[in-house]
Image (spheres, rainbow, N blue to C red):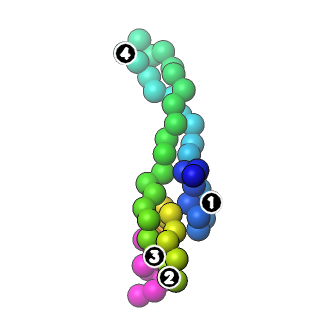
């Protein structure tokens, strides 16, 4: 299963980790995915979408 949000489609982004000598090594930044029940279905949703849906529902 890929690490993408099933609501907005956001996924991993690439970045660089830097050593003390400033050498760049490619790495991945993963989004914060949570499993939630949305309309009775289990969905892998990012925390940004969870916060947005909480604002819209209240």
Can you give x and y, in whole percent of width and height, for residue 4 in the image? 57, 55
Read off the residue under disc 2: 40
Left or right: 20 with respect to 13? left
**Quick check: can you spot residue 46?**
yes
Residue at x 42% of width, y 62% of height: 34
Which of the two labelled residues, at mark 1 and mark 4, occupies the earlier sequence position? 1
Tell me if residue 44 is in the magenta stretch. Answer: no
Say few, some or many: other residues with alpha carbon within 10 Å of mark 2 (under 14 / 14 to 19 / 20 or more).
Answer: few
In the picture as drawn, the residue positioned furthest to the bottom comes out as 58
Whether label 2 touches label 3, CB < 8 Å? yes
In the displayed structure, 22 sits above or below 51; it is: above
Q: CA distance from mark 4 to mark 2?
A: 49 Å
Which of the two labelled residues, at mark 3 and mark 1, occupies the earlier sequence position? 1
Q: Which mark is residue 20?
A: 4
Magenta: main secondary structure equals: helix
Examine the image and state in which quarter residue 57 appears. bottom left
Q: Secondary structure at mark 1?
A: loop
Point out the frontmost of discs 4 and 2.
Answer: 2
Can you give x and y, in whole percent of width and height, for residue 42 in the image? 49, 71
Whether label 3 touches label 1, CB < 8 Å? no
Closest to the observer, 22 or 47: 47
Q: CA distance from mark 3 to mark 1?
A: 17 Å
Read off the residue under disc 3: 37
Which of the two labelled residues, at mark 1 and mark 2, occupies the earlier sequence position? 1
Q: Secondary structure at mark 3?
A: strand
Q: CA distance from mark 2 to mark 3?
A: 6 Å
Read off the residue under disc 1: 9
Q: CA distance from mark 3 to mark 4?
A: 43 Å
Point out the frontmost of discs 1 and 2.
Answer: 2
């Amino acid at each position: 299963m890929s690490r993408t949000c099933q609501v907005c489609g956001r996924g991993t982004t690439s970045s660089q980790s830097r050593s003390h000598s400033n050498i760049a090594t490619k790495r991945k930044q993963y989004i914060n995915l949570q499993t939630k029940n949305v309309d009775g279905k289990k969905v892998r949703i990012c925390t940004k979408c969870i916060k947005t849906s909480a604002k819209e529902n209240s």
